[in-house]
Image: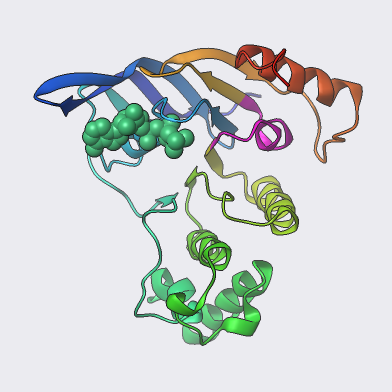
Amino acid sequence: MTSPVKLRVRGVSVSYPVDGQPREVLTPVDFECREGEFVCLLGPSGCGKSTLLNVIGGFLAPTRGQVLIDGQPVTRPDPRRIFVSQERGVFPWLTVEENIGFGLSDWPAAQREQRVEHYMTMVGLAGSARAYPSELSGGMKQRLELARALAVNPDMLLLDESFNALDAITRHTLRQELLRLWTAERKTILFVTHDLDEAVQLADRVLVMSARPGRIQRVIAIDLPHPRDIASLEYLQYRRQLLDELGLAHRI
Ligand SMILES: Nc1ncnc2c1ncn2[C@@H]1O[C@H](COP(=O)(O)OP(=O)(O)OP(=O)(O)O)[C@@H](O)[C@H]1O
C-alpha cells in the first residue's frame, strides 16, 4: 500500500533582487513526497537547495507557486517540522542538556530527563551535558542540533547539509542512527546534501537538481534495502548513475 502524500511542491520559483534586478535561483520546481519517505535533494553548490528547503520550512515565501503539507498551504514555520541547518544554530545561552530539552518544556520532568539523556548519548555528547555551545567544536554543535531536533519527535525533518562538519566516523554513526529512527518511526525526511554517497546510502529517492536556476533535473529511485552494501554492484551502479546525472562521470 502506498502512503498518503505528505508534501506537495507546486510550481515553486524564487527570485532574489540583485543590483535592482530579479535573479531567478529556482525555476519552477514540482515534486511530491509521501509520508514516511526519505528524499535527498542533491545538486551542485548554489543551485538553490537551501532556498527550496527554506520555502518548504515556511521561512521564505516563494516568488511563485505553493507548498502544501498534509494538504495545507505552508505560510510560516511550524514546530512539527524541524529544520536543522548550520546557520540556525543552537541557543548559546543554554547548556547542551538544556538545548536538547528546550522543546520538551511541557513534558513531566522524569520523562524529559530520560529523553534528553537518550538523545545526548546517541549523538555522543553525554560527557558535555553542562557545556555551553561556545565550548563545543563545530561538529559537536551540529550533533547537538540534530539531537535537539530529534528529541521533539517532529513529523517531518528538513535537514540541510546537517552532517557536513562531522568527521567520517561520526557522520557514519549518525547516518545509521537517522536510518534506525526513520525505520522505527517512519518520519518524512527531506535531506539536502551535495555528498553523492550520502544520497545513495540514505534515500528512497534522490532528486537531482540542475545548476542555477535550480530545477529538478532527474528523480532517481534507489531500490535497495537497508543496510546498503556500499561495495555491491547495485550500489555502485546507482552511484555511477548519479555521477552521470551530475556530469561528473568522466572527470573523476
Ligand atoms: N538572500 C539572498 N539574496 C540574493 N541571492 C541569494 C540569497 N540567498 C541565496 N542567494 C543565491 O541563491 C543561489 C542559491 O543559494 P542556495 O543557498 O539556496 O544554494 P545551495 O544549493 O543550497 O548551495 P550550497 O550547496 O552551496 O549550500 C546562490 O546563487 C546564492 O548566491
Magenta range is 193-205
Is residue 63 inside the magenta stretch? no
Which residue appears at 68% of the width and 18% of the height? 243
Q: Quadrant of the C terminus?
A: top right
Q: Nearer the viewer, residue 2 or 129?
A: 129
Q: Quadrant of the N terminus?
A: top right
Asked whether residue 238 is in view, the answer is yes
Which residue appears at 54% of the width and 34% of the height? 35
In which quadrant of the rendered view does residue 71 lie?
A: top left
In this rendering, would 22 be left or right of 59? Answer: left
Which residue appears at 40% of the width and 69% of the height? 103
Whole-percent x, y for residue 174 in the image: 68, 55
Q: Nearer the viewer, residue 227 or 4?
A: 227
Whole-percent x, y for residue 41 in the image: 53, 29
Q: Nearer the viewer, residue 137 or 65?
A: 137
Which residue appears at 39% of the width and 80% of the height? 94
Whole-percent x, y for residue 56 in the image: 36, 35
